[in-house]
Image (cartoon, coloured by chain):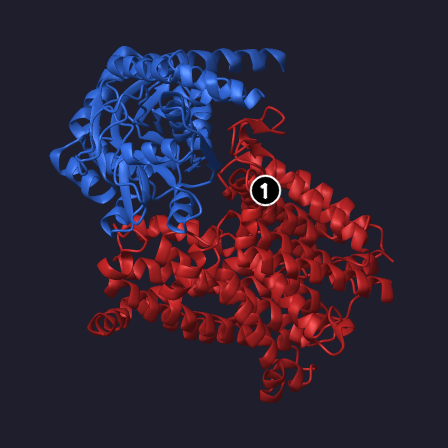
Chain colours: A red, B blue
Amino acid sequence: METILAGVADAFTLTNLLYIALGVFMGIMVGAIPGLNGPMAIAVAVPLTYYMSALTAIAFLIGINKGGTFGGSVAAILLNTPGSPESTSTALDGYPLVKKGKGLKALKMALYASVTGDILSDLVLFTVAAPLAIIALKMGPAEMASIFLFSLTIIAGLSGKSLLRGLIAAVLGAFLSTVGLDIETAQPRLTLGLNELIEGIPIIPLTIGLLALSEIIIQIEARFLKREQHAPAQDVFGRSIPRENKRVSLAEYRQCLPTILRSAAIGTGVGAVPGIGAIVAGFLGYAAAKRAAKNPEEFGTGKLEGVAATEAANSAVVGANLIPLLALGIPGSLSAAILIGAFLIHGVEPGPLIFREHGQLVYGIFAAMFMANWINFGIANVGLRLFALIVSLPKSVIHPVVVVLCIAGAFANGNSMFSVAVMMVFAVIGYFMRKLDFSIATFIIGFALGGTFEQSVRQAMILFQDRPADLLQHPIVLFFIALTVFSLWRILRSSMRSAPLPQFEEESTAREEKS
Amino acid sequence: MNTIFKTLLKLAASTALIVSAGAAWAEFPEKPITMYIGFNPGGAVDTTARLLQKNLEKELGVPVVAVQKPGGGGTVMATTLMTDKPDGYTIGMGASAAYVLAPQLNSDIKYKMIDDFDHIATVSIPQDALVVKADAPWNTYEELIADAKNNGKTLSLSSQVSVSRLMAIAIEKKEGIDIDVVPVKGGSVGIQQVLGGHTDMTWGASGWHAQVKAGDMKPLLSLGYERNADFPDIPTAQELGIDYAFVDTFMLSAPKGVPDDVLNTLATAVERALTPELRAELQSKMYLSADYRGPEATDEYLQMQFDQVKPFIEIMMSEDAK
C-alpha cells in the first residue's frame, strides 16, 4: 500500500503533467493525419526520452498512445480515411454522420467513447493485472489458433455485401502474410529475391497504400472525370448547423453507454491477450454492437453507436495491453512492443519481477495513465477545431498533402524507399479492390491475423500431431471452436435469409462518388 | 553547349580529385561516423551499441550517429552495410549469427561472412541458457535426458532462432531422444509457452534471467564457450559432451576494403571504449559480458564458429528438404 501511494505521489508533478499533455497533443495530431499513427509517433519519440526519468518517459509515451488512438478517429470521421488502422470501422458510421451535418457530434461521441473505454480498461489493468496475466499464460498455441479462427469468422461476417468476396479478401490477406521467413526452417518464402521482404511485407506501408492512397486515387479520379458528387459542405463547426448536431447530449451518451461498456469489455479482453491488437478490437466491438442492435441495418448509415462501439473498443486495448506487457514482458501490440524498448532504456525489464522490483514505478505509471485520460479529454475537447481543420480545406489542397503524408509515413517506416514502393503497389491493389468491391478492411485484418494464426496452427500441429486426442483436454480450445461453429452457422443463416448483408460504407461511398 | 558541359565535367573531376587527395592526407576521422544498429531499439544489441556509441565519440573525437536498421536478425543491416563506401565512416553493429548462420540457411542472402566485410571488433556476448519451468521434475540436464530416455518421452522446445534448433539436433544426435521443435517468433513467446506449460523448455540469449531470479524458471545448460559470468553453476553443452556451442557475439563491422590504418584506428577506439564502467553497465543492465577481439581475431572467431556449426546445419537442411 505504501508503494502504491508513493508511486501515485511520484506521478503528480508538473513535469509529468506537461510531458503527458505534450504526448497527448502529439498523439492526437499524428493520429489524425492519415498514414501516420500512434505507434509511429511513439517510435519516433522514444529517443526523446533518453534523458527523462523512467516514469516521465513512460507517461509521455503512453500519452502519445492514448492521444493517437483517439486521433485516428478524427480522420476516419472527417475524411473517411482512418488515421490509423484501428479506426477503420469508426469511418463506417462516422463519415455518414458528417454527411448528415453531424460531424462534430460524431467526433465528440468518439472522444467520449474513447475516454470512457480508456478509463474502464485502465481500471481493469490496475485491479486485475496479476490474475489476468495468469490466464494469459494458459493460452498455448492451440488456444491461440482457436481464438484466431474464431476472429476470422467474425471478420467474414463483417465483410461487404458478398460473403464470398469478403472471405476471398480475408484469405488473400492471410496469404500475403506468409511472405517472409518461414519460422520453422528460416527459409524465405515468396520474397521474389528481395532482401527487404525477408521480414515480410511491412504492415504500415501496406495499410497506408490500401486505405489512404487508394482512396485518394479514387477521389482524384472522380474529380477528373467530373463524377464528383457535390457533397454538402463539411463544415462541422458552421453556425448554420443546429447546436444539437454539435454536441452529444447526456441522453445520447446514456443511449450509447451499453454499447460503450460492451466494447470496452471486448477491447479490454482483446488487449489482455497478447498478439491481437487494437485493429481487431475495433472490428469486434463494431460487430458486437451491430449484432446486439435491434436494427442492425442502420449501422453504416451514420449511427452514433457505430462510432462509439469502435472507439471504446480500440481505446480500451491501450490500457489492457499493458497487462501482458507488465506481467509477462510480452507486448500485445505494436505500440506495446515499442514501450518495451523504452522500459529497457531505463533499466526496467517488464516481466513477473516488475511488480516486486519496480512497484513504485508501476503504480506511478498507473496514476499517470489516469491523468493522461483526463488530459486527453481536455485537450481533444479544446483542440477539436484545430484537429478538424484539415477537413475544411478544399480537396485540391487535401489530396496533395495527404499524398505527401502517405509517402512520408511510408518512408518513416524503416527510412527506406522500399516501404514507399510497397505503399504504391498496395495503393494500386486497393484501387482495384475498391472498383471490384472487395473489402479492404477484411483484407487487412486477414493480413494482420495471418502471421500469428499460421504460427499458432503450426505450433499446435507440432505439439499435437502424435496425440490429437489430447486437444480434448483443452477447454479453451473447445470453447472457441464451438463459438466458431456457432458464428459460422449464424452467418450462413443470415446470408440465406436476407441475401445482401449490410455493406461497408467506404465501398458504397466510393461507388457514390463514381456514379 | 557540349563544350561547356565537357569543361564543367573536367572541372568537377579535378575538384573531386583534389578533395579525395585531401581526404587521404587528413587524419581519420574528420567527420561524423554513421553506425547502423541491426536490431530494434531496447534489445541487447541496441543497448551495447548505444553504450559504446558515447565512449566511441570520446575516443574518436567526432560524433557517432546511430541509425537503426533492424530486420532478419541483423541480415538486413549487413546487406545494406556491404554496399556502403569502405572509408570507415559507415560501420554497423550486428551479431555473428547474421554472418555465420544466415548465409548458410538462406540462399537469398548474397553476402559472404568474411569476403564481404572488414570486421572491426567483437564487443560483447549474451549469457544464454536452456531453461525449464521451476516446478518441472528435472533439476539438471542429465535428469531431463534420463526422463526422456527411460519413459520414452518426446521433449518439446520453443525455439526462436536457428541457434536453438541446431542445439536440438545436436542433443538428439548425442542422446538418441526426440525433441519437437516448436518455432516461435521472439524469445518472450518461448518463455511464455514454457511458463504456461505448453512446451517443456526454451533456449534464450536474454530475457530468462528475470524469470530465473523470480524463481519461475530453472536454467539447465549453456551453449557458451565458457560458463556464464552471472550464473556459473550452469554447465556448458561442451562440458556435457555435446559437440555443439554457439555464442551470438555482438560485433562491429565495416564494408570490405577499409584501409588498414582506418580499421586499426576504429578497432583501438572500440577496445578503449570498453571501459570498466561500461563493462559493468553491460553486465548489470543486460547480462552481457564484454568480449573484445581485434579485426584479425574476429575473422578467426567467425571461422571457428562456422566450422563448429557446419555439420549440424547440414543435418538441418537435409531435414527441411524432406
User: Which chain does tag 1 point to?
Assistant: A
Tag 1: amino acid? Glu
In the rendered image, the vertical position of residue A255 relative to residue A328, given as above or below: below
Look at mark 1 in the image and give the residue it sits on: A454
Using the rendered image of the protein, determine whether residue A44 is visible from the camera's viewpoint.
no
Residue A503 spot, x, y in % from top left: 78, 62
Where residue B307 sits, quadrant-wise, is: top left
Using the rendered image of the protein, determine whether residue A272 is visible from the camera's viewpoint.
yes
Secondary structure at badge 1 equals helix
Residue A103 spot, x, y in % from top left: 66, 73
> Is residue B317 left or right of A488 when viewed as pictured?
left
Q: Residues within 10 Å of mark 1 (few under 14, many from 20)?
A: some
In the rendered image, the vertical position of residue A128 relative to residue B26, given as above or below: below
In the rendered image, the vertical position of residue A270 relative to residue B235, given as above or below: below
Q: Residue furthest bottom?
A: A251
Residue A248 spot, x, y in % from top left: 60, 82
In the rendered image, the quadrant that contains the C terminus of chain B is: top right
- Residue at 68% across, 85% down: A242
> Is residue A7 left or right of A108 when viewed as pictured?
left
